[in-house]
Amino acid sequence: MRLSSPFFSILRPFFLSVISVLLLLTPSAFADIRVPDAVVTPIAEDAGTKQHAFVASPLDLAAYDYVEEEFMISGTANTYKKSGRWRSDGEWGIQISQADLPYATRLLVRRPANPEKFNGTVVIEWFNNTAFMDVDVIWAQSHQELLREGYVWIGVSAQTLGVTALKTWDRERYGDLRLNSDGLSYDIFSQVAQAVRRQPETVLGGLTATTVLGVGESQSAIRLTTYVNAFQEPALQVYDGILLYSRFALSAPLKNGISMLSPSKVFIRADNRLKVLQLETEQDVFMFLFRLARQDDTEYLRTWEIPGASHYDDYGVSNLLPQYQRDWPQLGSIELVCKNSLNKVPQHYVVNAALSGLAKWASDGQAPAHSTRIEYKNLKVSRDANGNALGGIRLPDLEAAIATHNYANYGVIGSGNWFVNAFACPFLGNTVPFDQAKLNALYPTHQDYVSKFTQAADAALEAGFLLPADHKEAIAGAQAADIP
């Protein structure tokens, strides 16, 4: 029967009515969640007994023509529960569990003092709470790039552990904060970005943002994975791109907790419309099983993998420790004693490139490069003759290697702070320098080493995995190194 038949013409209004009803009953691809405006209130720099913000930068920000300001952000947010079954495909539905719950938490803002220096991009970091307090992991890795290029950086105390630690550290300064459930964190993260767009006079000191990026590392990236998959619609309203740095195969629950046990692996949903860049170290890919959640790049997704790199590293630790030893003096006596030396692959260079690439992608549509994947066979990483992983982003530290880089590390039993070391060391990887005989065989002269290093650095620069300033710094380091 052709659709143009008289029979169809008679029943056509009926069919159209049925189709219209079915369309109304079919749930939309993304949950329709309203993002309410929050109230943003400055916290005086000298407030409280400590008279400075927790994790205030130990850098002399004024020397970079930057200012640091702190705010309380307050309002109401919802908690949520699953709607339907959550599968590995990430196409997740949600519904409100409890509506309009009051909260108050804090923002830490580092921004250019001179509006002419602002590059238009705001980076909003979900503070990592793995250490039971706020940790500005991505700032620690990428502060050089953020400062030299004129970004605004904002840290968000999105979770209860961070807020509890703030109130413990200085109750007079942070006593008005209240955050009773991590279930509120997703709405809060949306409201912060909306405040950046709608309240720039307060949050940004009058600067106007053209691009807003959400970023998180490790536990924060795991929660942001849930944010991308379950809160796609509000995220699209307020964020232009998301950086998932060192996420695992799993994702986070809608309430408290680090990760869900089911589904056991989580992909970024196929109908995602946020620009998402996933940045994974060798340790994330294998020890933390991200390889199970690998998926092809798409118009809205890029995944970069860094061979030789551990979940965190020597560079990050050296930048984080000073501010925590300042704010918690009892940490000053803690010595990190690991069985092996910490990993020294400069993954911060790739984090810088990822931020820069994501910002360009979000602002002008110039997509970042595609990264190859780290190679493995029979569940073991494929390695070259020097013991370094094959595949992935080829930094000169692997292409012109002077050490073996991996993620094998452990705390030393019997050390004075064994519990801390047992917890921290396995995340910090290992770098084992080659002996002199091997260096002599690989690089008969210093210029042999510099030439090979420079060739690899040039290739990484051209591919977009190394920024010009970092390319220059890396080559200067190779030229100054006593190799062979």
Image: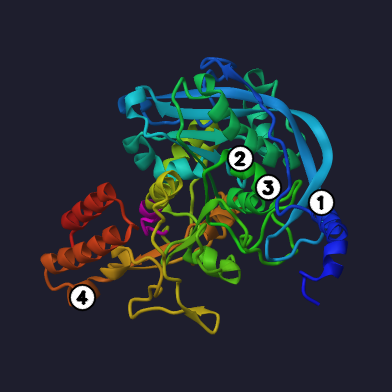
Where disc 3 sits, the SS reads loop
Indicate yes or no whether the magenta region holds residue 420: no
The reply to whether callout 4 and callout 3 are in contact (CB within 8 Å) is no
Residue depicted at x 75% and y 42%: 183
Q: Nearer the viewer, mark 1 or mark 3?
A: 1
Residue that numbered label 4 is attached to: 442
What's the amino acid at mark 3?
Phe
Task: Looking at the image, tell me whether mark 1 or mark 3 is earlier in sequence order.
Answer: 1
Left or right of 100 on screen, residue 424: left
What's the amino acid at mark 2?
Gln
Residue that numbered label 3 is attached to: 231
Residue that numbered label 1 is attached to: 24
Where disc 1 sits, the SS reads helix
Q: Is residue 484 visible?
A: no
Q: Nearer the viewer, mark 4 or mark 1?
A: 1
Crowding at label 4, few (<14), some or many (≥20) Cα neighbours within 10 Å?
some
Task: Looking at the image, tell me whether mark 2 or mark 3 is earlier in sequence order.
Answer: 3
Q: Nearer the viewer, mark 4 or mark 2?
A: 2
Left or right of 164 on screen, residue 25: right
Q: Nearer the viewer, mark 4 or mark 3?
A: 3
Looking at the picture, tell me which residue is in the foreground, 215 or 475. Answer: 215
* Residue 237, numbered circle: 2
Q: Is residue 69 above or below residue 265?
A: above
Magenta span: 343-350
**Which residue reaches farthest front?**
6
